[in-house]
Amino acid sequence: LYGAGDAGTIFTDLCRREGKDIKCFLASDGQPLPNETPYGIPAYNIGSCPYDLSTASVLITISSRYKKLPDFVKIVNEHGTKHVMQMSNELFHAGIGELI
């Protein structure tokens, strides 16, 4: 997951309920990493991620309302990821409704 904020936390919770495995959270190089992440899942700056991103699927869990979202898609693509998805606002809000 690219982004360990509120949306990343919500999506992680939904995935765990469905038995899906999240390997790590990603952040842009140079960005501070969170001290704590949901369920202790590791967080890495994208340039130091130990996983082969060319075979990974990355979900960007940053609101589509965020103006720099295209920059994040570009960053993930530049690191070789062919399967990049963006979390829709509908999914984000559905997740909030599910957790309330």
Image (cartoon, helix red, strand yellow):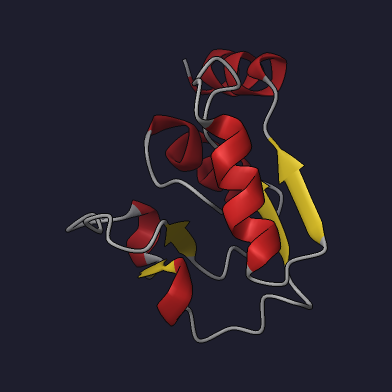
Residue 95 in the figure: left or right of residue 56: left
Above or below: residue 33 compared with residue 80:
above
List x then y, in percent, for residue 96: 52, 18
Tell me if residue 53 can be seen: yes
List x then y, in percent, for residue 61: 56, 38
Count of numbered badges drawn on the protein: 0
Q: Report the residue that reaches farthest toward the left.
A: 35
List x then y, in percent, for residue 11: 57, 39
Q: Specify the quadrant that holds the N terminus.
A: bottom right
Residue 51, picture quadrant: bottom right
Which residue is pictured at 56% across the width and 41% down the height? 71
Residue 77 in the figure: left or right of residue 47: right
Residue 65, picture quadrant: top right
Which residue is pictured at 67% across the width and 75% down the height? 53
Which residue is pictured at 59% across the width and 63% down the height? 22
Which residue is pictured at 36% across the width and 52% down the height? 38
Residue 81, picture quadrant: bottom right
Above or below: residue 55 compared with residue 93:
below
Tell me if residue 15 can be seen: no
Q: 16 or 24, which lies in front?
A: 24
Residue 11 in the figure: left or right of residue 39: right
Q: 25 or 98, which lies in front?
A: 25
Above or below: residue 22 compared with residue 2:
below
